[in-house]
Amino acid sequence: MPNTPDPAPAWLRVTTLAVAAAATVVVVWACATAWGAVVHGHPAYAVLLALTLVGAVGVGVRALRRRPSRPGWRRAGRVALLVLGAVGVVLVAWLRPFGAVEPALAAMRSDDTVTVTEGATRYTLAPADGGDGTAVFFQPGARVDARAYAAVLRPLAEAGHTVVVAKQPLGIAFLATGAFDDARAALDADRWVVGGHSLGGTVAAMAADAADDDAEAPAAGLLLFASYPADDMSGTLTAAVASVSGSEDGLATPAKIDASRADLPADAVFTVVEGAGHAFFGDYGPQPGDGTPTISHDDARAQISAAAVAFVDGLTPAR
């Protein structure tokens, strides 16, 4: 009788099925808990979820079929792929965005004062009267739904400044370093204020430093929300700087914000919102690692918006 190859070890089949099942659960969980952020975010995460689900189904089906054992390096390769797959499942789960909540969602609606337009890679809050020539480009914090900043930034549009908020691939600002240049090419503005929250502010600082000497539409200002630059730009950045932070921030802590003074120009203006935490700079719910706020979110939002409007107004010539 011909020899029949031994089936793959049971432990390998079970482990493969477990990873495939975990991937499916993560995709379902991400869609169920952050569907709005997935649909309204940059397409990259939605594509990643779809590929993860297709891969999980394919791997699961193959594992259920009785296949011959692959001894030696081929089995080792399969085990290595399983490990990579498990790491990938964890990464997909970690990348699930913090979805926008009210009042940010309400602030995404157009009215007689502000027109809101949304595309695949950014949304824009434009003054109905056309604006005053000063535009604000904003980078969200890591894994935060871009819509979460609509309520805190809308007062800028109501004050006459066009606001553009980037939708970052996978919610990571470092994957959207070209978004500011794209916005400048798409919108007609005399000057720009580049801003961002948390990691988004770090990337915004890089963009402002690179564009502060632009001849046509320079970066006239850098607006940091609970953020600080990654490197020393105290001697290179010529744009005005406003740093707005929270006294109860557990991530961009007061100590880190204070240390950033040395990396920014000497005339940078620092505003501390007493009682505000890291997640109070947007509307996306609580964030792990944050401090405990001692004021209301509405109060903090009003103070943050007021500081932002005062800063941008100060960079805009009178019409």
Image: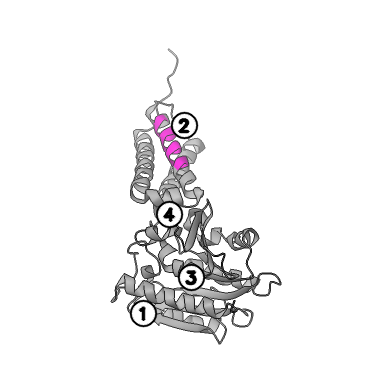
Q: Residue furthest top?
A: 1
Number of the front mark, 3 or 4: 3
Quadrant where the C terminus is found in the figure: bottom right
State the CA–CA distance, disc 3 to disc 4: 29 Å
State the CA–CA distance, disc 4 to disc 2: 34 Å
Residue 257, given in percent of the width and then of the height, sits at 45, 79
Q: Amino acid at mark 1?
A: Ser
Viewer-closest of 33 and 40: 40
State the CA–CA distance, disc 2 to disc 3: 63 Å
Q: Residue furthest bottom?
A: 266
- Residue picked out by circle 2: 70
Quadrant where the N terminus is found in the figure: top left
Secondary structure under the numbered disc 3 in the rendered image? helix
- Residue 156 bears which disc, if any? 3
State the CA–CA distance, disc 1 to disc 4: 27 Å
Residue 31, given in percent of the width and then of the height, sits at 37, 46
**CB atoms at circles 1 and 4 under 8 Å apart?**
no
Q: Amino acid at mark 2?
A: Arg
Q: Amino acid at mark 4?
A: Leu
The magenta stretch is: 50-61
Number of the front mark, 2 or 3: 3
State the CA–CA distance, disc 1 to disc 3: 23 Å
- Residue picked out by circle 1: 247
